[in-house]
Amino acid sequence: MKFKNILVPVDGSEHSERALRCALELAKCQEARVTVLHSFGNIPMLIGGDGRRELVTALREESRKLMEPFIGILREAGMPEQFIAREGRAAQVIVDEAKEGGFDLIVMGSRGLSEVAGVLMGSVAHRVLCSAHCPVLVTR
């Protein structure tokens, strides 16, 4: 199976950094591109108008800051800086972006920042595995 477009969701955790490094190794072998994705959660519908736009802008900027170390890893690997920041629940954003963006592989960490002892796989990774249209590689 040949992959051309790899999506790597990140949340700032070590798990997502390991997933990115794994994706980069795959990308080198497959001559694929790697895109980093960060979801910054849902904004309550009570916030509208200019306040909503300002909040989305601020959250996108925070996402950019959070993704900077991951973008640095892309740079070190000689890959183009491709990143996306989207509003929404993480699992749904990942599944939607993978489909809409034409990604043929998702590489993600088994857990994120909200690690819970005793859980074998994070709920986001589990939801993505159950819903994605393409293969999902979950790293530890």
Image: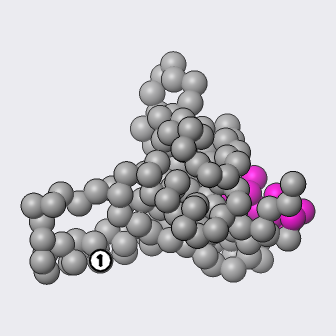
Left or right of 86 in this view: 132: right
Is residue 70 at all visible to an observer of this figure? Answer: no
Quadrant position of the N terminus in the picture = bottom right
Q: Along the line of sight, which residue is nearer the eye, 65 or 106?
A: 106
Q: Amino acid at mark 1?
A: Thr
Q: Residue at x 54, y 44 (%)?
A: 131
Is residue 103 at all visible to an observer of this figure? Answer: yes
Q: Splitting the image into 4 quarters, where does residue 35 fall?
A: bottom right
The image shows residue 132 at horizontal and vertical percentages of: 58, 48
The image shows residue 74 at horizontal and vertical percentages of: 68, 71
Task: Give the answer, above or below, for where 36 lies relative to 50.
Answer: above
Q: Residue at x 28, y 72 (%)?
A: 56
Q: Splitting the image into 4 quarters, where does residue 104 fall?
A: bottom right
Secondary element under disc 1, as helix, strand or loop, is helix
* Magenta region, main secondary structure: helix
Left or right of 36 in this view: 40: left
Left or right of 125 in this view: 79: right
Q: Residue at x 51, y 19 (%)?
A: 118
Q: Along the line of sight, which residue is nearer the eye, 20 or 86?
A: 86
Tell me the residue that label 1 is attached to.
57
Which residues are drawn in magenta?
20-30
Residue 113 forms part of the magenta stretch: no
Residue 22 forms part of the magenta stretch: yes
Q: Residue furthest left?
A: 46
Within 10 Å of the Cα at label 1, are there few (<14), some (14-19), or many (20+) other Cα atoms?
Answer: few
Q: Residue at x 62, y 58 (%)?
A: 8
The image shows residue 68 at horizontal and vertical percentages of: 53, 70
The image shows residue 22 at horizontal and vertical percentages of: 75, 53
Q: Along the line of sight, which residue is nearer the eye, 100 or 107?
A: 100
Q: How many marks?
A: 1
Q: Along the line of sight, which residue is nearer the eye, 67 or 35?
A: 35
